[in-house]
Amino acid sequence: MWAMDGVMGKASVYLETFGCQMNVADAERAATGLRAAGYELIQQVEEADVVLLNTCSVRARAEAKVYSRVGEVKHGQRKNSQLIGVMGCVAQLEGEAVFDHAPAVGLVVGTRATDRLPLLIERARAGEKQVSDLGEREEGEEWNVSPVERHSPYIAFVPIIEGCNKFCSYCIVPFSRGRERSRPAAEIIAEVEKLKNLGYREIHLIGQNVNSYRPRLESGLENFKGATPFSRLLRAVAATGMERIKFTTSFPRDFHSDIVQAIDENVNLCNWVHLPVQSGSDRVLRAMRRGHKASDYLARVAAIKNSRRRLALTSDIIVGFPGETTGEIGETVQLIEQCEYDSLYIFKYSPRARTPAALLLDDISEEEKAARFAMVEEAQRRVQKSIYNNYIGTSVNVLVERESTRSASDLMGHSTCHKIVNFRGGKDLIGKTVDVRVTEIKVNSLYGELV
């Protein structure tokens, strides 16, 4: 969660964000529009005229947290006239039902109404009791983010596609984010060039499924080879000379081997791929409507492992999907051992309204889900420890982001392979890229010394 502060304006706004990188990018865009409209962005929730909660709905617990937070804000407010707004995925899904769940809320703003936020706030502050906008983006809208609103002065998120057409049976994203819409290639390339000129060292091309990128027109990609528009976009972005380029998340069915070839050809395309598999069981994958078998996934992993560089591989796993057997969770553990993931995000299945899986009997107890979570976690811990041990004595290139939260004398950053790296160094190194020799491994990070 984070908020932004700013200059004087006609009203003060506190903006708090939950969830994924796309939500952070939406908050940056919202803040840019609000400040341009004359609003002041502050860090004190109690002092704000307007409180905006930018929400996530990917899991039931995340949605429940939103309503809990609304209650906290209402209880702690010092201004009776304070306007509380819910924006983002929960707003898009629940619509005006948010007003019923949380009567303290006066504003509901969907995921595609970000640019209309200043006008919606004006309507609410002018006296409308319940203002909502769940509409689509207006034709001709451009992704415009001021450097002042970026979450980091060194790393920038660059959305290339929003929405999802995959309709996995458990996933709410197609309903909260809508159908896939790809940004024009020329607009993306121009944004990356601008960021480079502003001194940014690293960008993340982001989207629910970045490698499903399909622009209406390929203006800006015509001079770049590639089997898919996404692989051509990777080469075009690499040609800008941006120092470090990462992308997430990739969808297995759309992961073409040419993506690996593009990484091999361009050293500034970082050596990390996030490729969610969700399960190692073909039956569960069919029930999830993932569109791939375990063997299909392993073929893509083989292409990644055969890269000329060592590409770090990370993934997502869902345990306890309806009907999953102990044998099928065993297949997932086996796949984890085969893929040798550098890290893994593990989730316990929770049903989401509107999704096809919500119609299935959620027949696995929370206790059993927790046990399966622990089983998968232990398998990944063994694999990860072996991988991390191989880093001892080697050097990794690190973009230094800030002081370490664990020690005031240490700095923290991410390697090109997207591992957290801590090392001893002075604050003058923040914002720079340095080589660090790994001397020690932690549970989910590396520790080292400057080369």
Image (cartoon, rainbow, N blue to C red):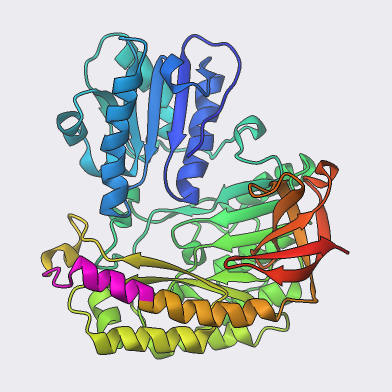
Q: Position of residue 364 (x, y in %)?
A: 18, 72
Q: Position of residue 395 (x, y in %)?
A: 81, 71
Residue closer to the observer: 40 or 208: 40
Q: Is residue 17 left or right of residue 158?
A: left
Does residue 141 appear in this view?
A: no
Location of residue 420 (image quadrant): bottom right
Q: Is 367 in the magenta?
A: yes
Q: Position of residue 330 (x, y in %)?
A: 33, 88
Location of residue 361 (image quadrant): bottom left
Q: Is 214 in the magenta?
A: no
Query: What residue lies at 53% left-to-right and 55% top-to-bottom?
Result: 206
Instruction: Say if 205 sits above or below 318 in the image.
Output: above
Does residue 146 appear in this view?
A: yes
Residue closer to the observer: 383 or 407: 407
Query: What residue lies at 70% left-to-right and 60% top-to-bottom?
Result: 421
Q: Is residue 429 left or right of residue 444?
A: right
Start-end of magenta stretch: 361-374
Q: Is residue 238 left or right of residue 221?
A: right
Q: Is residue 152 left or right of residue 379?
A: right
Which quadrant does the C terminus fall into? bottom right
What secondary structure is the magenta-colored segment mainly?
helix
